[in-house]
Image (cartoon, rainbow, N blue to C red):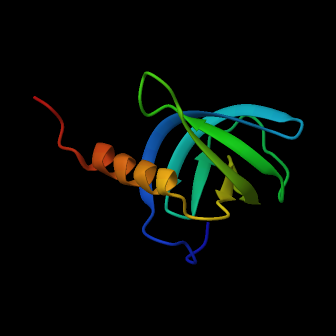
Amino acid sequence: MDNRRIGNRIATRFESLYSGDQVNGMGTLADISYSGALIESSNAKPEQGKTIRIFVFIQPIEPLELTGTVIRHTDSGFAIEYPEVEDEVRRMVDDAAAIVCAPPRP
């Protein structure tokens, strides 16, 4: 994504599944912000402009869900943008930042 994002990008490595109009796939959530996310190592790329749902496996009980529009492709994935910054997305970004920045346990 570009530098117009709201908030900082948080680098992550969470497994994810996604689905949209005539495409289903899996990949890695490579980074996330309050306005978008980057999926890398994807096995299928949704068309630009299409809305997709991404299920991110941060917690073992149930995945967190993001819905956004595909805004660009990368060599190994794609980027999405959210239409609004919802409280749930904001909490997810904050949780991801806490998980990624937490010191390793001995």
Report x, y in % for residue 16: 58, 34
| Residue 1 location, quadrant | bottom right
Quadrant occupied by the C terminus? top left
Front one among 19 and 103 = 19
Report x, y in % for residue 7: 44, 70
Residue at point 78%, 37% (across, down): 44
Number of numbered discs on residues:
0
Front one among 80 and 104 = 80
Front one among 4 and 86 = 86
Residue at point 29%, 48% (across, down): 98
| Residue 79 location, quadrant | bottom right
Horizontal side of 77 relative to 11 (left or right) equals right
Report x, y in % for residue 4: 58, 78
Instruction: Give the residue furthest to the left.
Output: 106
Instruction: Give the residue furthest to the front.
Output: 87
Report x, y in % for residue 32: 50, 55
